[in-house]
Amino acid sequence: MKAFKFPARHGYSVEISPFIPTRLACATSQYYGIAGCGTLLVLEQTETGITLVKSLDWNDGLFDVTWSESNEHILVTGGGDGSLQVWDTANPQPRPLQVLKEHTQEVYSVDWSQTREENLVVSGSWDGTAKVWDPSCGGVSLCTLQGHEGVIYSTLWSPHIPGCFASASGDGTLRVWDVKSGRCRLAIPAHRAEVLSCDWCKYDQNVVVTGAVDCSLCVWDLRNVREPLSRLLGHSYAIRRVKFSPFNQTVLASCSYDFTVRFWDYSRREQPLLETLEHHSEFVCGLDFNLHIPNQVTYQGALLSSHLPRLVFDPRHCQHKLCISICSG
């Protein structure tokens, strides 16, 4: 297993670059985000190990990270002080290009739009609002969307429909929003518990998955939300993040506070669970599929004072796996 040591940080999010298949970014915080500062780690995997490309500090915890879809050097992070930070890894100065500050509580989710018609970032906050930003147009949000009755944990752009994103909240609902009208198009009582994560199917614009504190994943068809298409059970604690595979329409992954990463195929009614990975001894918080390499996944957790993003291959398709561990020094 390749290892990279970094002191006193806990991992919250990991994202693989959409431009460079060997590059990944990790949003981290001190003291589990309760106090202290945060660090954005930009890493490069090589044949012999893991190297640090950039280490960028912020004065509060960092909870999420997203890569620009138009510039390989640009990233956005969400912080515990209610701000978004826009970073340029090609900038020799170790400070953000911009700081976008309107939220009044922690920014727990950031996502860069994937459709060609727009270049927008959506943020979700514990203040219960989602905001849409154009980083090229200064430090003022384009719009603020309200409707959730609890904190927002996840905001994700549709990969199919411009100006449309989904949000998951502590109020137990999944909501779908239209930026142009500034309205919620659909509100689904997805779980009888806090919903911590959601993701869009990459092949069907009507399919979304949610993961919640009730330990279940629900796959929804937005055209008929009376019942989920599938309810996936197996985790023993809250599900922190869910991601659909970019290479298989019905395959998805989840990571949990039960220390595991699980792979599912919701089209398999009798046995949807494909594999369970148990490399961690603490919460697993971050998860991402590599868009360039089929079935490669990076996932990230905190091991008390350690942080373990690992890259693994879906065991159904590969004969080996590559693991990357990021640990405290």
Image (cartoon, rainbow, N blue to C red):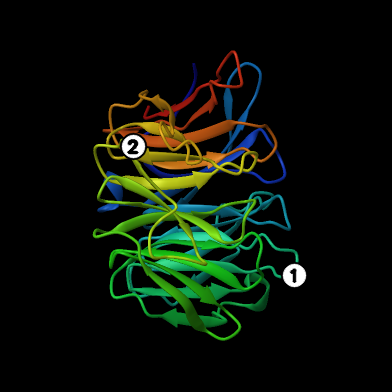
Q: Which residue is mark 2?
A: 8
For the image, the number of numbered tags is 2
For this rendering, which residue is in front, 143 or 29? Answer: 143
Q: Which residue is mark 1?
A: 117
Identify the residue at horizontal 34%, vertical 27% (top origin).
Answer: 280
Element carrying mark 2: loop
Do the numbered discs 1 and 2 sit on residues whose CB atoms are within 8 Å? Answer: no
Report the amino acid beneath label 2.
Answer: Ala
In the displayed structure, 60 sits above or below 105; it is above
Left or right of residue 201, residue 136 in this image: right
The outermost residue toward the front is 270
In the displayed structure, 242 sits above or below 321; it is below
Identify the residue at horizontal 49%, vertical 83% (top origin).
Answer: 183
Image quadrant in which you'd find residue 301: top left
- Residue 271 on image: x %, y %: 41, 31
Q: Residues within 10 Å of mark 1 (few under 14, many from 20)?
A: few
In the displayed structure, 65 sits above or below 122; it is above
Left or right of residue 211, residue 22 in this image: right
Identify the residue at horizontal 43%, vertical 42% (top origin).
Answer: 286
- Residue 67 on image: x %, y %: 61, 53
Left or right of residue 255, residue 31 in this image: left
For this rendering, which residue is in front, 55 or 113? Answer: 113
Asked if residue 195 shows in the view, the reply is yes
Identify the residue at horizontal 75%, vertical 64% (top origin).
Answer: 116
Q: Residues within 10 Å of mark 2 (few under 14, many from 20)?
A: some
Question: Depth-wise, is mark 1 or mark 2 nearer the camera?
Answer: 1
Image quadrant in which you'd find residue 130: bottom left
